Image (spheres, grey):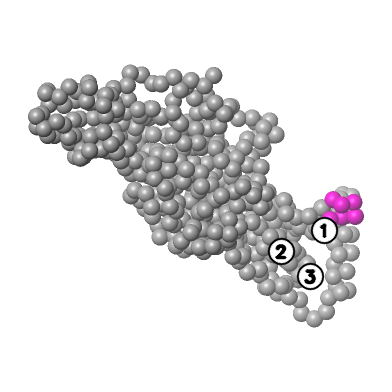
Amino acid sequence: MRERVFLAVGFAILLGALAACTSGPLSCPSAPAAADWGPIAAMNGQSSVDIELSRPYIIERVGAMLEGSQTGDSGAFVRSIDVKELPGPVSVLEVRLEPWQRGQDGTPVSLQRSYRLTLKITPHLVTPATVPDAARRKQLLCPASDPQCTANQGALLSFDLQELYNLSFSRVACDTPDMFDVRIVPAIYQNVAAQKPLVLPTESISGVLAGAAGATPNLVDVNISADGFLKVGLRYNLGATHTFDRVTELRSRFSNTDWGADIDKSILTAAVRARMLKKLVERAPGSSITSFSATFSPGEIRANAVGALTVPSLCGGTTTVTIDAHNPMQVCKDANNQSAIVSWTDATYSTNNFCVSLATFWDTIGVGTISGPPPVWPTLALVQFPAGANDTFYGTALDLDNAFMIVGRSTLMDAKLAAQGQPRPASPGNCPGVP
């Protein structure tokens, strides 16, 4: 009861003060223009890698962004956040805000109003092709706190004002505004304009692709969807692409995770074939692969190929060899306690050219049969990278069941759950050979 009396008196004083200094029609300032965060992506609907961010993670990140920047005498509590698609489709965040005024003791006091802030999620593509100025690319992609940042390409998501709606009176906030709107709306506008974009971990995803494909991947487009989870499709210049699917997989298939990166299998298939061919040509110039297939199954990628190899002319000049290779693969913690994808290759072969000493020949070109895994599995790529202030993404598992999907967690969410008395079990385990 005392709190209600205090609030009522506070409102009366505030209302009186506003009335005393207000004359003529009331109006709000113009809505802030969207900041320049680089060229907006074309969103042509094709993707090479699909990144998913869980709904709880997005709520935590966006809530911290909106509330963390409020340091003045007024602001707004973030009461709820929803991630959704509007007709178009348009990907948005809907945020319910409850404005506050700082009391005499410094404590924020609710103004007992409610607004719905709708922010449009806009993807920006920053590459040497879209932003030729290297200094400008660094300004957009690198945090000011990291002078060593060398990011040269990437994507970021801005949250641009689409609508501010007064839920308390069921109208657009500045449609016939009252004295509270005139006081509250500018503070909300200012807070929205101060928000930094969310920089996506494209540099680390590019590192995974480079490690797998042995080539430099260039980012060429970005797509987004916000149907409950936030999904981002990155299109690279490697391999085939697929139609960007707006349906999420984290929601139905992976529990206790915060993010996932689903890499198009064609990129990995092409990478395995290219590496196999490169090895054959290095040791037997003129060789070729006449057929190739790759199968993705739990725990490994298996490749089958038929190669035409050059051999001494007395043996016919060429011979056909069949190669069966399987690559066990997993996500684990390496010797530096970082999440990594590790893998090794086991290969067998057969041929009908009996005049060739196969053991000697294959030993020469370095494709002999391996007996069992090495003591320490070689690292294909690290999957641990910064995802924002006080946050690091790290991989926990690799789904190879007709897919190549890395899933993982956020240290920000780990800390939040631990503070709530719900610590997550440790994951992943140590890599083979790491004590």
> Is residue 239 shown above or below 360?
below
Residue underneath mark 2: 190
Badge 2 marks a residue whose secondary structure is helix
Asked whether 380 or 402 is in front, the reply is: 380
* Dominant secondary-structure state across the stretch colored magenta: loop
Where does label 3 land, which residue?
A: 179
Amino acid of disc 2: Gln
* Residue 186 in view: yes
Q: Amino acid at mark 3?
A: Met
Seen in the image, is 344 located left or right of residue 36?
left
Q: Which mark is residue 73?
A: 1
Q: Which mark is residue 298?
A: none
Residue 57 locus on image (x, y percent): 59, 44
How many neighbours does mark 2 have within 10 angstroms: few (below 14), some (14-19), or many (20 or more)?
some
Residue 122, image x, y percentages: 54, 60
**The image quarter in which residue 211 lies:** top left
Dot 1 falls on a residue whose secondary structure is loop
Q: Residue at x 32, y 28 (%)?
A: 326
Q: Calculate the distance from the C-alpha at mark 3 to the C-alpha at mark 1.
A: 17 Å
